[in-house]
Image (tube, helix red, strand yellow):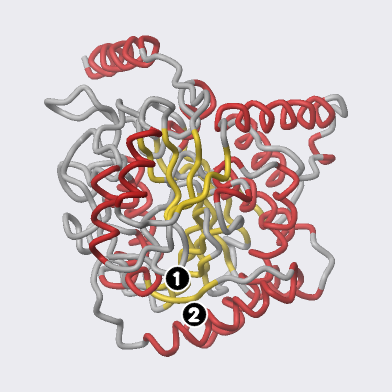
Amino acid sequence: MMHVVRLLLWLGTATLIASEKVVRYDNYRVLEVGPLKDANEANLILGLVDNDQRLREVIMLNDNIAKTAPVELAVSPDSYDRVQEILDENGIHFLVVNNNLQESFDETLQENDARLQKLKSNNDPTLFDHTAYLRYLDQVSWVQNAAAMSPIATVFNLGTSYEGRTIIGLSINAATNLPVIWIDANIHAREWITSATTLYIIDEILTGTSADAQYLRSNFRFYIIPNLNPDGYEHTWTNDRMWRKTRSPNAGSICMGTDPNRNWGAFWGGEGASDLPCSDTYRGPAAFSEVENVAARNFLQFLRPICNLYISIHSYSQFWLLPYGGTRDKPDDYDELMRVGNLVAAAIKNTNGLDFLVGTVPDLLYVASGGSFDWTKLDNGMDYGYSPELRPATAGQGGFDIPPVNIIPSGQEMFAGLVVAAREAKHKL
């Protein structure tokens, strides 16, 4: 009977997915607004932004409003004059950095397709060189191949997504008693650079010849989830490049999905998360309503006695964020978290010359409740928790549509940061 019910649920979901239209962003302008001077201007901008994902009129591209950088908005052709008028009337400076967002998406996909065709023509999975974004099943295949070729790597199943996809993970040195580091990525569907960067990190740990690669390979166990939101990720390839959330239905609403990084238990339902199912930052009907988050939570609870460094990779803005996100209060070990974060930022700077700002979410942005690293610290007792926001710094430099040529340098930056974080945190691991 359970199999019949599951089949019916799957068929209903498949019908809903098939009926959803493909969302395009033809002639959408991307605006860099500000930096904003105060909370009044921030509230004005938030008032412009859609609270209904179906509207797609004014979309905020940043994960939250930053205090030191412009707010970045994607504005439909029909809404541009209204938005321009409101900004001008309130003396808020803005700059148009892209006149056709869809054109940029199309160019990036064309470039990516050409790179993928070149890779697949080799017919050798060992030749994958991190120069293209992969669909989810290709990511799974790559992880499986990487594990098959390494005596210290094992594939594991973290759980199953709402739409039935296996959430694949890779463990390194699982048979040892070494201290444990957790890494996850792509919890927000549209952040393609994060899973691509994580695959680079896996490759470097397993096959790198540098002293840093050998250090990580010899001194730590890793549990790495390259893509924690496979349903949403696939939806960005097939239906809506700007999709952010999971793909679960919401009772009483025709809008799909929950923001998985507003759905963790710590500070759930607080500031910076929406209670509207149609919002891009919808927190869900309850903490851990999303099966993907439950799977990650359960595994992290299992690792609690042996894992003390948690890294959840996001994009974009070039931040190295530390707890807390859901409150303006600081953790007791804030100075230590900042010390390590600043060393990480210095290592990233030394790698490719990019500046990453270090701080808590409210210090650099505004309060955002229900995030994963708050839960891992407050409820799961892990001392070190970080959420890097990868390159680029702005939408004008690519935003979520950052070209695939950035995968390798992003991987280099995050690998350098990981080495420092692991080395500095080792005394508590």
Determine whether, in the image, residue 191 is placed left or right of residue 131. left
Give me the residue at 68% from left, 38% from top: 142
**Secondary-structure class at tag 1:** strand
Determine whether, in the image, residue 356 is placed left or right of residue 288. right
Residues at circles 1 and 2 in contact by the CB criterion of under 8 Å? yes
Q: Which mark is residue 429?
A: 2
**Circle 2 Cα neighbour tier, 10 Å, few/some/many (<14 / 14–19 / ≥20):** many
Q: Amino acid at mark 2?
A: Leu
Seen from the viewer's position, the closer of residues 149 and 30 is 30
Q: Return the residue at label 1.
A: 307
Can you give x and y, in whole percent of width and height, for residue 173 in the image?
A: 62, 63
Give me the residue at 65% from left, 39% from top: 144
Determine whether, in the image, residue 104 is placed left or right of residue 366. right
Q: Amino acid at mark 1?
A: Cys
**Circle 1 Cα neighbour tier, 10 Å, few/some/many (<14 / 14–19 / ≥20):** many
25 w.r.t. 284: above or below: above
Can you give x and y, in whole percent of width and height, for residue 248 in the image?
A: 29, 30
328 w.r.t. 87: above or below: below
**Secondary-structure class at tag 2:** loop
Distance Cα–Cα, label 1 vs label 2: 6 Å
Give me the residue at 52% from left, 73% from top: 357
Can you give x and y, in whole percent of width and height, for residue 253 in the image?
A: 16, 25
